[in-house]
Amino acid sequence: MTATITGSFADTVLNGETECVTLGHGSGGTLSRALLKEHFLPHFGGTVLRRLGDAAVVTAGVSHVVLSTNTFVVNPLEFAGGNIGSLAINGTVNNLAMMGAQAYYITVGFVIEEGLPLAVLDRVIASMAEAARIARVEIVAGDTKVVERGKGDGLFVNTTGLGFANTEFRPRASGARAGDIVLVSGPLGLHGATILSAREGLALDAGLESDTAALFPLVERLRRATDGEVSALRDPTRGGVAAALSEIATASGVGVEIDESSLPIPAAVGHTCDLLGLDPLHVANQGTFIAFVPESCADAALLALRSHPLGAGARRIGVAVAGHPGLVVLRTTFGRARIVDLPNDALPRIC
């Protein structure tokens, strides 16, 4: 199936010699994939990079290490449930966890805009330190740059995380198989809805807050409950559940069918998305993962996830199928089916 871009947005993106980067290229959806495929991978596309995992497993001497690099550009910098500092640590830890690895070391780089209040910077740094303590990861190196007022959006944070691979536990995007059960570890859309609500000044449920958290302890429970039989793991950040499921379906050559009635979308998330004309499946998460597990392991996996506070809301949401490979299909509460498209529009400064 070929994605189609229509309207004035298409004119902006596909206008010949004046083509330029748009905010849509940062959405985690169709345009993000095109940017990687057409511009980065032709030059940087070694074997490891072309796997496009959450992190890279590489050999260093006799060890297999897992590396991940991330840049965080959220706006506002501080939000209900966290700030750009805790988000940066947790996001890096989670990228390694999705490859079955525990994070041990992190480096951090700061691009600070002139005029950022030092009190804000102090809160961000303190939050990073606390998140690192909870995740049991050490910040071992860093760098700072200051740019002129108006050129940095307050603060950007770049991280690199290093962990060690578990040779007996290697979930990967290409590992899903027909018959696998699709699980989510918790509520969907909380992080993105929180950021969008704060940015737009929406007066919604006061309980709406980001789900940012380090997920490795939850992944460990899943691994033990399934004896490592986890076909695929993904944390649905940019592009949300739609992008994560599509990546797994495409890489594995399977179709995915999900049940609308089983999706754990909090009411406040639904209200925010309704007001802004968004699909909750496109909205970012920062403390939830998607797991594909064999049907024989699904019940044990759910029990293990629900036994941990971060997984109390774990649900079975669908199944991998042999039909319509690469496509994600939603079975609606009305008994109909629709294809879950990738996001094209921009949701900037989410993570």
Image: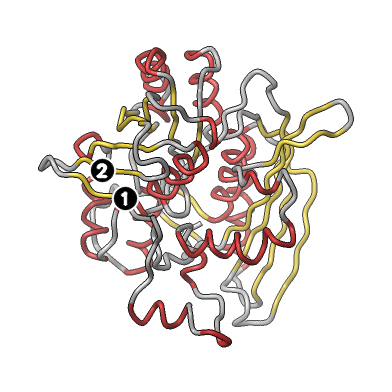
The residue drawn where x is 39% and y is 62% is: 3
The residue drawn where x is 68% and y is 67% is: 111
Q: Residues within 10 Å of mark 1 (few under 14, many from 20)?
A: many
Say what secondary structure mark 2 lies in. strand
Q: Which amino acid, by three-letter code, is at mark 2?
A: Leu
Image height of 101 relative to 351, above or below: above
Comes first in the chain, label 2 or label 1: 2
Q: Which of 233 and 274 is in front in this view?
A: 233
Q: State yes or no: discs 2 and 1 in contact (Cβ < 8 Å).
A: yes
Q: Which of 37 and 187 is in front in this view?
A: 37
Q: Name the residue under label 2.
A: 330
Where, by quadrant of the figure, is residue 132 drawn? top right
The residue drawn where x is 44% and y is 40% is: 249
Q: Which amino acid, by three-letter code, is at mark 1?
A: Val
Say what secondary structure mark 1 lies in. loop
Image height of 50 relative to 320, above or below: below
- Quadrant of the image containing the N terminus: bottom left
Q: Mark 1 points at which residue?
A: 340
Q: How crowded is mark 2: few (under 14 residues within 10 Å), some or many (20 or more)?
A: some
Residue 242 image point, x, y percent = 38, 48
Residue 228 image point, x, y percent = 55, 17
Residue 277 image point, x, y percent = 25, 65
Measure the alpha-carbon separation of dots 2 and 1.
6 Å
Q: Nearer the viewer, residue 256 or 84?
A: 256
Residue 231 image point, x, y percent = 51, 26
Residue furthest to the right: 61
Residue 54 lies left or right of residue 146; in this view the side is: left
